Image: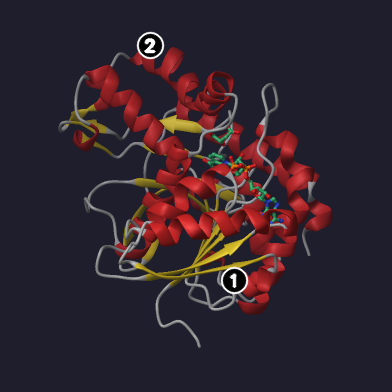
Amino acid sequence: MLSTYPKVAVSGSAGQIGYALLFRLASGQLLGDACKVSLSLLEIPQAVGTLDGVQMELQDCAFDTLADVKKTADAETAFGDADFIFLVGARPRGPGMERKDLLQANAAIFSAQGKAINAVAKRTARILVVGNPANTNCLIAQQNAPDMPPEAFSAMTRLDHNRLLAQLAQQSGQAVADIRRAIIWGNHSATQYPDIHHATIDGQAALDVVDEDWYRNQMLAAVQQRGAAIIKARGASSAASAASAAIDHMRDWALGQKVAEDYLSMGLVSNGEYGVQNGLVYSYPVQCAGGKATVVEGLEHNDFSAEKMQTTEKELQEERDAIRNLLP
Ligand SMILES: NC(=O)c1ccc[n+]([C@@H]2O[C@H](COP(=O)([O-])OP(=O)(O)OC[C@H]3O[C@@H](n4cnc5c(N)ncnc54)[C@H](O)[C@@H]3O)[C@@H](O)[C@H]2O)c1
Ligand SMILES: O=C(O)C[C@H](O)C(=O)O
């Protein structure tokens, strides 16, 4: 029997992000308390057994927002008729590795999954790539799914966005909720550009509240290197915060952002906005309303910002060139 509930597919669901994500999806944190969801868990064959245990735990939570749970090692089965697809499954980096070291290891996974999405996913599905290197994995999946609208695909920079908000809140002593219009530009990597030139803190320009030297010389690197700092401290990459950001990203995309005038950050297929090469998956400021994410256009940049935006674009071009063989 076909489920009548929104179907949420998660690849890599036996991994550490999967374990943090599934219980939040099942408890109504994506679509709200009034909406049941049907979970579709994708794993490699060796890990499907682990999913039996995860499924038992999901059942034991007795969530009234969970309709059913299915497990599979077949991507087409997992993604068929899905409304939301979280592509998490990938090899995470270890200490001392850069995210782009994972490029070849993970590129094959995303080309196969892009093809599966193209074959069976709803054309209205929303797809979020979390597995690293997220922007280029997203590019590979999207290019292998030519029958899907490009705007169905996104890469996760919401964790970086949230990290930026947290840094600003801590430094200014204000609440996260009082910060607006922070932006992550470019790649989910050490070249990303966390931009506060358009941000406000409790209604004041952020750069009138926090020290510009601190921003340029400490905060930028702290956000760019936060993933590595967590790996060093925890011995494993961020999981709960990544799952939380993934929920934030999909929820706001589907249901609309909480504060209309705010900006969020999402990696989207570029249509040339801000001079970025067409087709790259680049993180932009967006506004989410009516089920759509729209790039905020017309922001002006000083030389400092322009240079940083180009540096991260260049890295994305290099990543794309390294996996050209997997693009159709
Ligand atoms: N974009 C971000 O902000 C962000 C943040 C944190 C982590 N990540 C990335 O997310 C990914 C997952 O991290 P994790 O900590 O959960 O890793 P993990 O190793 O704990 O779990 C990954 C899971 O994916 C599964 N998997 C591998 N290949 C698969 C395939 N072809 N199909 C389905 N499942 C497959 C593995 O069996 C494993 O269970 C990593 O690439 C990590 O770097 C991204
Ligand atoms: O840094 C990593 O490899 C994990 C993740 O991308 C993160 O930003 O925490």
Q: Position of residue 71 (x, y in %)?
A: 60, 66
Q: Quadrant of the C terminus?
A: bottom right
Q: Position of residue 286 (x, y in %)?
A: 38, 51
Q: Quadrant of ligand 2?
A: top right
Q: Furthest residue to the left? A: 203
In this rendering, position of residue 216 left or right of residue 171: right
Give the residue drawn at x 43%, y 38%: 241
At label 2, the amino acid type is Asp
The front one of 168 and 313 is: 168
In this rendering, position of residue 156 left or right of residue 261: right
Instruction: Note whether residue 100 is visible.
Output: yes
Q: Is mark 2 within 8 Å of ligand 2?
A: no
The front one of 204 and 306 is: 204
Residue, disc 1: 79
Instruction: Note whether residue 269 is visible.
Output: no
Q: Is residue 78 above or below residue 2?
A: above
Residue, disc 2: 213
Which of the numbered marks, if any, corresponds to residue 34? Answer: none
Q: Under tag 1, what secondary structure?
A: helix
